[in-house]
Image (cartoon, rainbow, N blue to C red):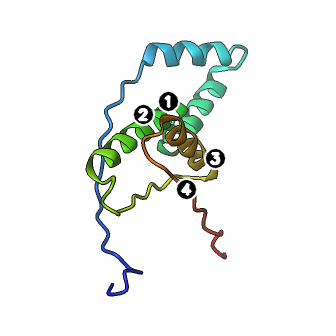
Amino acid sequence: MEDKAVVPLLYEARDVPQKVDRNAIDSWFEKITLGLTDDQKADLKRKFSTERQLNKATQKIRVIAWDVGLHYMAAYQGTGLKGQLVTPDKETSLQYKDFLDEFGMVSSEILISAPSAP
């Protein structure tokens, strides 16, 4: 810590309010599943309604990126401190980067760790 290579870590959980329009989702789902059986539809719903899948939704990423940018800008910009956002996969990290760049409130970089050995 003396040489500043290691710095204290402050964890801040953020609650980003989000509204889910169930009617729009259900309507879209019915359109894209025309021709599937009820069992196939149920299987598809189970597969894509997991927390992991929902956390990768573009609308959710956009709202969270906006909140992260605002919060960092207001609380930490100019202090020399940095922030870290962890994502479930590479594709999601690229989406966050795109939105953070588009909003222009903070600068960001992507760091991808090598896969762990089995």
Q: Which residue position holds label 2?
A: 63
Q: Amino acid at mark 2?
A: Val
The foreground one among 29 and 57 is 57
The residue indicated by pointer 4 is 109
Instruction: Check disc 1: other Cα within 10 Å, few if <14, some if 14-19, many if 20+.
Output: few
Residue 72 x %, y %? 34, 49
N-terminal of the pair, mark 3 or mark 1, is 1
Image point 45% across, 13% down: which residue?
A: 23
Amino acid, disc 4: Glu
Say what secondary structure mark 4 lies in. loop
Characterize the local packing of mark 3: few (<14), some (14-19) or many (20 or more) Cα atoms within 10 angstroms.
Answer: few
Can you name the residue that lies furthest to the bottom here?
A: 2
Foreground disc of the pair 4, 1: 4
Point out the tag, 2 or 3, that comes first from the N-terminus. 2
Quarter holding the C terminus is bottom right
The amino acid on which the numbered mark 1 sits, given as a three-letter code, is Gln
- Give residue 58's position: percent from left, percent from top: 54, 33
Query: What residue would you read off at disc 3?
Result: 91
Residue at (48%, 39%) from the top-left corner? 104
- Label 4, label 1: how many angstroms apart (C-alpha)? 21 Å
Mark 4 and mark 1 residues within 8 Å of each other at the beta carbon:
no
Mark 2: which secondary structure?
Answer: helix
Badge 1 element = helix
Inspect the image, locate mark 3, and give the three-letter code of the amino acid beneath it: Glu
Residue underneath mark 1: 59
> Is residue 21 shown left or right of residue 40?
left
Q: At x 26% / y 50%, what residue is drawn?
A: 75
| Quarter of the figure with the N terminus | bottom left
Is 25 located above or below residue 1 in the figure?
above
- In space, the residues marked 3 and 1 are separated at their CA atoms by 14 Å
Res 44 label: none
For the view shown, which residue lies furthest in the right direction? 35
